[in-house]
Every structure is written in C-alpha cells, then in structure tokens.
Image (cartoon, rainbow, N blue to C red):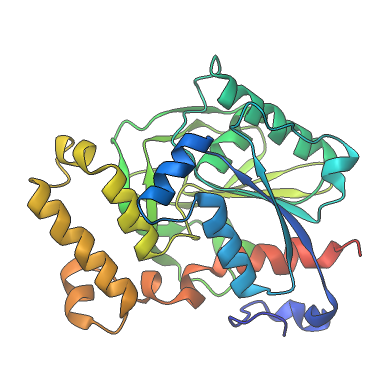
C-alpha cells in the first residue's frame, strides 16, 4: 500500500496506490493575520496541519494551497478547479452566517465553484458549515455554547456505521474539536453519520451530481500540540467562558497537552486528561481522512 499509516478499507486492495499521484487543493479558511498569529504561537496553520496529515498518509500526494479568506487572493473557477483530484477545507475563526464579511462571502462562492467542478471535497468544521449554507442549510451559534478540546462520545448513526467514511472506526469515539457554531438545519438530502450530546450533526455527507461531500464538525486532522497552540491563542476567552479557573490552571493544562503529544506513552497524563487511543493513535485519529483519499480521490486520479 502507498500509505505510510495503515489502510482500513479492504476494497482498495484492487488499487495500486504506489501508481497514484493525486493533486489536492487545500484551502486555508483563516485570513493572513490569523495565520501569522498561529505562527507566532509556534503553531502550523489549519491548512498546513491538513497538508501534514495528507503527506503522512500518502507521501506521493501533490498539494496546492489557496488562501480563501485573503481578499487579494484570486479565486479559481471552472477548469482551474477541475484539474484537482479533490479539495479540503479545514477550520476558521470566521462565522459563515456573517455574509456581509467579504472574507466569508468569497469562501461561500469558492465552495459553490468547487461543487460545480464536481471534484470530491472534504470539510472539517468551517468546511462543513460552508458546504451546508451553499446547499441551502442553516448554521447558527450552538445553543450549548462552545465545544472545545475533546468532542466526547461521538456516536455513529445507522447510516454512519455502514458508510465508507468510518470504515475502521469505532461506533463511539472521541475527537479533537473547537467550534462555536453548528448546523441547525440540514440541506435537502443530507445524511447525518455521527452525533453527540453537544451537536446533533458531528458528521454528514451531502450527495452532489457526480461526487459526495464529506464533512465533520470535529477536527480529525488536529493533534494535541496543535490544540495546545489554539488554547494559548484563546486562553483569556477560555478563562472568561469558564473552561479554566485562571492563567495558572490554563497553563498547566496546556503543558500537559504538550507533554502528552511529545510522549504519548505518558499514561499518567492521558489518565489525567481523560484521553486514549482515539486521540493518541494517528491510525485512529486520521481514519476519516484516509478513507476519503482512498475511496473518493484515488479512485479518480486524473494523471
């Protein structure tokens, strides 16, 4: 197999992944100043994090980046999009219902163009929300407030248990996450694949003309180090919202995340944080991304 982290989808045995050389467009949902802030905190950007995962899974993948929120970035259309074998959109601190913001409206237009190009598209959090509004659904602030850190006890629906997205995944699992908004009304013909007590739609697929959009409200591309950096960037707001008592409390938790990322064998820390292989083992964490590449992208590589 071509993947450096093991495959969980038996049907791809017929595909010689070594001969596949896909080209994937990865879209950065945050504007340039937010990306610079992430770099200043020692973090990758969301698009860089996704690229790292894709390259770990399939090193032969060619990746191009697009900064969708930057007003000086020309957006591709038509054949410029159709040349890609797939597109990925990760997270953003923007809100999709803020359509008067050109950084939002231009990304809605971009996703519409990707759908028209009929290439596979994968979305985490912001990506799922963009796809939802493009197809006529509604996204609103989550009535349960912010879900941040770990999305607990995500449960596959009956449709999710048989869908390619979750081949090799447990029926109940935890995933890293950060979001304030959620889908309050699904587009027509949407299929919910996973839910938890915080958000009814944790994963969904939208059937398009000749492809299928896969989306998650959580972030399978995150790791603990990336999460720690996000906490550093938002620590004052998290204290205000009651996630931490004070700066000392926040710094301790962040240090524990960093230590566990550096040494996943620290069972003392994993016990304190209440995390297990769902979050520590990349084979588990990246299942949905790997399945998307294997079943949606590699099956139609153009080269």
Where is residue 293 drawn, in percent x and y? 70, 65
Residue shown at the point (66%, 28%) measured from the top left = 72
Quarter in which the N terminus is drawn: bottom right
Q: Residue furthest top?
A: 100
Q: Quadrant of the C terminus?
A: bottom right
Q: Is residue 303 left or right of residue 29?
A: right
Give the vertical position of 231 relative to 241 (above or below). Answer: below
Dividing the picture into quadrants, the one containing residue 60 is: bottom right
**Position above or below: 283 against 224:** below
Regarding residue 279, the answer to whether it shows in the image is yes
Image position, residue 165 (x, y; %)? 61, 62
Q: Residue at x 40, y 65 (%)?
A: 172
| Rendered position, 16 above or below 166 | below
What residue lies at 50% left-to-right and 60% top-to-bottom?
Answer: 221
Left/right of residue 118 with respect to residue 149 in the rendered view: right
Q: Which quadrant of the structure image shows residue 239?
A: top left
253 left or right, relative to 130 = left
Is residue 193 visible from the viewing direction of this image? no
Q: Is residue 251 left or right of residue 34?
A: left
**Residue 280 picture location, percent across and down:** 37, 74
Q: 186 or 101, which is in the foreground?
A: 101
Return the x and y of residue 41 as percentages of the image width and height: 35, 51
Please tell me whether residue 153 is drawn above or below residue 18 in the rendered image.
above
């Amino acid at each position: 197999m071509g993947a450096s982290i093991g495959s969980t989808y038996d049907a791809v045995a017929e595909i010689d992944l070594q001969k596949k050389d896909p080209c994937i467009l990865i879209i950065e949902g945050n504007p340039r100043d937010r990306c610079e802030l992430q770099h200043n905190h020692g973090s990758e950007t969301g698009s860089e994090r996704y690229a790292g995962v894709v390259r770990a899974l399939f090193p032969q993948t060619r990746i191009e980046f697009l900064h969708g929120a930057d007003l000086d970035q020309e957006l591709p259309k038509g054949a410029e999009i159709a040349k890609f074998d797939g597109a990925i959109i990760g997270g953003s601190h923007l809100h999709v219902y803020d359509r008067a913001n050109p950084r939002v409206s231009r990304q809605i237009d971009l996703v519409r163009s990707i759908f028209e190009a009929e290439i596979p598209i994968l979305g985490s959090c912001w990506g799922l929300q963009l796809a939802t509004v493009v197809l006529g659904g509604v996204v609103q602030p989550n009535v349960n407030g912010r879900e941040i850190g770990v999305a607990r006890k995500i449960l596959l629906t009956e449709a999710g248990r048989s869908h390619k997205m979750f081949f090799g995944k447990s029926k109940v699992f935890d995933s890293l996450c950060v979001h304030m908004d959620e889908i309050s009304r699904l587009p027509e013909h949407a299929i919910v694949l996973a839910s938890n007590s915080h958000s009814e739609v944790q994963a969904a697929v939208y059937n398009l003309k000749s492809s299928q959009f896969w989306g998650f409200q959580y972030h399978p591309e995150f790791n603990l180090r990336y999460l720690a950096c996000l906490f550093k960037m938002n620590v004052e707001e998290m204290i205000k919202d009651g996630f931490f008592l004070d700066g000392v409390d926040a710094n301790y938790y962040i240090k524990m995340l960093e230590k566990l990322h550096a040494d996943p064998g620290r069972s003392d820390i994993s016990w304190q944080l209440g995390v297990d292989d769902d979050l520590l083992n990349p084979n588990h964490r990246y299942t949905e991304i790997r399945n998307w590449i294997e079943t949606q992208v590699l099956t139609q590589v153009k080269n």
